[in-house]
Amino acid sequence: MFTPKYPPKDAAPAPTVIQPQTTTPAPAQAAPVPVAPAAPVSNRPTIQLTPGSTLALVAGGGAAVLVVGTVLVSMLLAVAITGVSVAVVALVIRLLVKDLQKGR
């Protein structure tokens, strides 16, 4: 399935040969441009989208976007809650240290 398919060796076009003129000197000519062989025809079947399959693809893509969005928002919310809790703990520790330094 994943092996490349090459055209047969005999399908390559014959190289063009330019014969120089022997009676009169020929002006300088550019080298001939090699012609690329024709692209091989694919044996794979073409994908045909029906209205039902198009709707299924759109619905699947929308569901994937919603799931990824939900995961990202929940991660952001977890980071925000962790930051707020660390700030509250730091405030409580600072107040406790301040009270200990006053000698209460």
Image: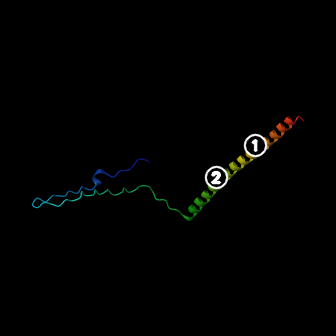
Among the 4 quarters of the image, the one containing residue 45: bottom left
Q: As rendered, which of 18 and 86 lies closer to the eye?
A: 86
Outermost residue on the right side: it is: 104
Q: Position of residue 76 (x, y in %)?
A: 69, 50
The residue at 49%/59% (across/down) is: 47
Q: Residue sitting at 56 percent across and 65 percent down?
A: 51
Mark 2: secondary structure:
helix
Q: In the shown orientation, is residue 23 left or right of residue 7?
A: left
Separation of residues labelled 2 and 1 (CA atoms) = 27 Å
Query: Which quarter of the rendering shows the C terminus?
Result: top right
Q: What's the residue type where badge 1 is placed?
A: Val
**SS state under label 1:** helix
Residue 59, percent from left and from top: 62, 59
Q: Residue at x 82, y 37 (%)?
A: 97
Colour scheme employed for the rendering of this structure = rainbow
Task: Give me the disc on residue 86.
Answer: 1
Tell me the amino acid under the disc marked 2: Val
Q: Position of residue 79 (x, y in %)?
A: 71, 46
Q: Which residue is mark 2?
A: 68
